[in-house]
Image (cartoon, helix red, strand yellow):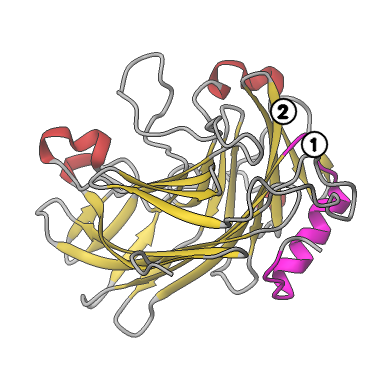
C-alpha cells in the first residue's frame, strides 16, 4: 500500500444497475480483479481508479498567486460510477458569464465568514488572496476492497499566514450499485479562537454538480427529502428571517439531476455527531449541503463526517433512509 495523503474515507461501488428500494442491486462483474489504485499527476491532481475506471480526482495543485482564482482551494471531482469518464461535478473554471458560480467546486468544505485576531477570511470564495492549500499526503492506501486518502491542508488569511490546519480524509469501498464516499475532517488551530460562520450557500460541506446542470436545472433537477420527492426546480434554503424548520438538522438530502443526457442521484448523509444546528441549502443549478457555526480553539478542534452516495437513475425515500441508518449505525461497507 502506498502512503501519501490524509483526506476522509470513501466507499466506491461497481455495478451495472441502480439499487432497488431498500437494498443494493446485485453485484455485477467488476472491471478487473486489480482493485483500487492511485495515479498521481504531480502538481495537478491525484486520480483514484478501480482497475482502469476513474472514481475520484483530488485537485491539489499548489496555490499560485498569479493564478489565484483557479488554485485557491483543493477539492474532489466525482466521476460516473459506471463508465468512469463522465465528470458529475463542476471544477475550477474561468470566471466568465457562461460559468455560473464557479467558486462552488466538486466536493468541497469551507466557510465564507471566518474571523480571528481582528481579521476576517473567506476560504469559500478566495477573496482578498485568502486560500487553502494541499501541503502533503499523509495517507494513501489502495487495495482490492477499499481505498483511503488523507491530506494535510492549511488555511491561509489575507496576509498569507496559516490560521488553521486540516486533515481531510476520503474512504471508498468496493460495493455494488454506485459510488459511496465517506468524508471526514479534523480542523485545528494554534490561535486563541477562530470563529467559523457563514451562510447555507457558502459554508460547510457541499456537492456541486457539473456546470451543464446550471443551464437546465429548473427543468431537470429535483430534491428527495425525508418528507418526500420535491417538484422539478423546487428548493429549500435556510433563511434567518423566515426560518423553515425543514431545512434544519436534515438527517439526509438527495439531489437528482441530468448530465450528458443521463439521470443521476446523489445522496448526502449527515452524522448525528456533527455540530448542530445544521442549516441546509439546495439550489436548482446543482449544489447542496449544510453548515453550522463553530468556535475553533486549541482545545475545541472541529471534527465532522458525512457520507455521499452516487448512482445512476432515481432513488426513493425508503432507500435513502436505509442508507442513512446504515451510516449512523457505523456500517463501513455499502448501504446494506
Q: Where is residue 79 in the image (x, y as percent from the top left)?
A: 55, 38
Q: Position of residue 172 (x, y in %)?
A: 58, 59
Q: Give the range drawn in magenta.
A: 312-333
- Residue drawn 57% across the image and 67% down it: 276
Classify the position of the N terminus by image quarter. bottom left
Of the residues under marks 1 and 2, which one precedes in the sequence? 2
Q: SS for tag 1?
A: loop
How far is disc 1 from disc 2 in space, using C-alphas?
7 Å
- Residue drawn 20% across the image and 57% down it: 156
Front position in the image: 205 or 149: 149
Q: Where is residue 224 in the image (x, y as percent from the top left)?
A: 76, 41
- Residue drawn 55% across the image and 16% down it: 215
Instruction: Give the residue furthest to the bottom.
Output: 299
Q: In this view, does 6 lie above or below 205?
A: below
| Residue 314, numbered label | 1
Tell me the crowding category of disc 1: few under 14, some 14 to 19, or many 20 or more residues within 10 angstroms, Cα based: some
Q: Is residue 44 above or below residue 260?
A: below
Front position in the image: 4 or 126: 4
The magenta stretch spans residue 51 = no
Front position in the image: 220 or 265: 265
Please indicate whether residue 213 sits to the left or right of residue 299 in the image: right
Contact between labelled residues 2 and 1, with CB atoms less than 8 Å apart:
yes
Query: Which residue matches tag 2?
Result: 263
Classify the position of the C terminus by image quarter. bottom right
Instruction: Give the residue furthest to the front.
Output: 33
The magenta stretch spans residue 317 = yes
- Residue drawn 78% across the image and 28% down it: 231
Q: SS for tag 2?
A: strand
Tell me the crowding category of disc 2: few under 14, some 14 to 19, or many 20 or more residues within 10 angstroms, Cα based: some
Q: Position of residue 284 (x, y in %)?
A: 61, 28
Amino acid at each position: 500500500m502506498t502512503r501519501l495523503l490524509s483526506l476522509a474515507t470513501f466507499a466506491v461501488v461497481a455495478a451495472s444497475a441502480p439499487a432497488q428500494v431498500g437494498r443494493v442491486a446485485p453485484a455485477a462483474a467488476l472491471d478487473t480483479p486489480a482493485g483500487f489504485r492511485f495515479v498521481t499527476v504531480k502538481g495537478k491532481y491525484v486520480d483514484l481508479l478501480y482497475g482502469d475506471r476513474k472514481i475520484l480526482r483530488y485537485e491539489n495543485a499548489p496555490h499560485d498567486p498569479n493564478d489565484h482564482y483557479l488554485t485557491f482551494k483543493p477539492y474532489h471531482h466525482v466521476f460516473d460510477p459506471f463508465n468512469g469518464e463522465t465528470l458529475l461535478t463542476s471544477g475550477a473554471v474561468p470566471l466568465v458569464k457562461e460559468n455560473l458560480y464557479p467558486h462552488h467546486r466538486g466536493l468541497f468544505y469551507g466557510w465564507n465568514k471566518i474571523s480571528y485576531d481582528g481579521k476576517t477570511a473567506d476560504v469559500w470564495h478566495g477573496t482578498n488572496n485568502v486560500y487553502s492549500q494541499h501541503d502533503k499526503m499523509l495517507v494513501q492506501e489502495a487495495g482490492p476492497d477499499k481505498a483511503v486518502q488523507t491530506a494535510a491542508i492549511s488555511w491561509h488569511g489575507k496576509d498569507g499566514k496559516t490560521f488553521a490546519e486540516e486533515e481531510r480524509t476520503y474512504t471508498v469501498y468496493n460495493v455494488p450499485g454506485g459510488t459511496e464516499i465517506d468524508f471526514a475532517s479534523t480542523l485545528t488551530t494554534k490561535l486563541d479562537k477562530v470563529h467559523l460562520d457563514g451562510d447555507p450557500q457558502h459554508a460547510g460541506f457541499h456537492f456541486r454538480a457539473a456546470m451543464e446542470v446550471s443551464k437546465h436545472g429548473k427543468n431537470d433537477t429535483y430534491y428527495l427529502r425525508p418528507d418526500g420527492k420535491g417538484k422539478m426546480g423546487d428548493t429549500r434554503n435556510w433563511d434567518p428571517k423566515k426560518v423553515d424548520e425543514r431545512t434544519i438538522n436534515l438527517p439526509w438530502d438527495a439531489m437528482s439531476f441530468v448530465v450528458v443526457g443521463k439521470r443521476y442521484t446523489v445522496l448526502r448523509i449527515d452524522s448525528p455527531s456533527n455540530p448542530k444546528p445544521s442549516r441546509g441549502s439546495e439550489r436548482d443549478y446543482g449544489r447542496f449541503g449544510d453548515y453550522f457555526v463553530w468556535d475553533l480553539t486549541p482545545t475545541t478542534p472541529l471534527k465532522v463526517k458525512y457520507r455521499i452516495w452516487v448512482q445512476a437513475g432515481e432513488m426513493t425515500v425508503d432507500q435513502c433512509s436505509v442508507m442513512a441508518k446504515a451510516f449512523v449505525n457505523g456500517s463501513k461497507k455499502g448501504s446494506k
